[in-house]
Amino acid sequence: MLNGAGHQLYNLEPLAKLDRVTEKHAIRVARLCLMIGRVLGLAESELNKLRTIGLLHDLGKIAYPKEIIAKPWRLTEREYEMIKFHPTIGANMARVAGYDRSIVEAIWSHHERLDGSGYPRALKGRRISLFARIVAVADTYEAMTAERPYRKALPPAAAIKELKQADKYDRKVVQALITALGSPEMVLAIAAAEI
Ligand SMILES: [Fe+2]
């Protein structure tokens, strides 16, 4: 059950269950969001919102044919361009369903990056909400460490290294993820050994 997620008219969470891969991803992202939020010391009400954001961040993908979403190989350039609308579609659905504004905003911005290289609005830095910066890290980490039919999973430490190197992610959020996953020394030691 949702708690503290605002006064939504409908519960969209079941709609996040597009296919098993997407559902698993959403659950893992929600867990990671919560882990990061706890390290950052967010209040319980904020953590509940984060959980909802994690579960619903890819909600907009239900607007696409299942063949594209569950495609066992890489998307074509044209398909990728189409998929770039999913944050806007998902945010609109969550807004119409009555979800809290901060939840809608984070769904809309989960592919935005601090350096402005993200989509759909190419927002930069602080124009991206903390919730969106958290789900961006959780989503990217989960995607990198999950096995896909067209590529191998990256070891956790290698994924963390990628997140730390890029100017795209909030350092405090990445640090919170490292703290949540274990000691940074351990993560870095594993990274050094594997790359
Ligand atoms: Fe997404």
Image: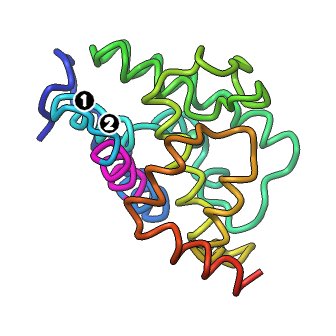
Q: Which mark is residue 93?
A: none
Relative to 28, is 65 above or below? above
Quadrant where the N terminus lies? top left
Looking at the rendered structure, the secondary structure element under dot 2 is helix
Give residue 80's quadrant in the image: top right
Question: Would you say residue 34 sits in the magenta stretch?
Answer: yes
* Residue drawn at point x = 22 percent, y = 31 percent: 11
Is residue 163 shown left or right of residue 31? right
Circle 2 is placed at which residue position? Answer: 50
Circle 1 is placed at which residue position? Answer: 46
Q: Nearer the viewer, residue 186 or 101?
A: 186
How far apart are labels 2 and 1 at the CA level? 6 Å
Quadrant where the C terminus lies? bottom right
Q: Position of residue 84 (x, y in %)?
A: 70, 32
Query: Ligand 1 shows up in which quadrant of the image?
Result: top right
Q: Are circles 2 and 1 on residues that touch, CB within 8 Å?
A: yes
Amino acid carrying mark 1 in the image: Glu
Residue found at the very far front of the displayed protein: 185
Question: Would you say residue 186 sits in the magenta stretch?
Answer: no
* Residue drawn at point x = 71 percent, y = 27 percent: 119
Relative to 44, is 104 above or below? above
Give residue 188's quadrant in the image: bottom right
Is residue 166 shown left or right of residue 147? right
The span shown in magenta is 28-38
Mark 2 packing: few (<14 Cα in 10 Å), some, or many (20+)? many
Q: Position of residue 180 (x, y in %)?
A: 37, 60
Looking at the rendered structure, the secondary structure element under dot 1 is helix
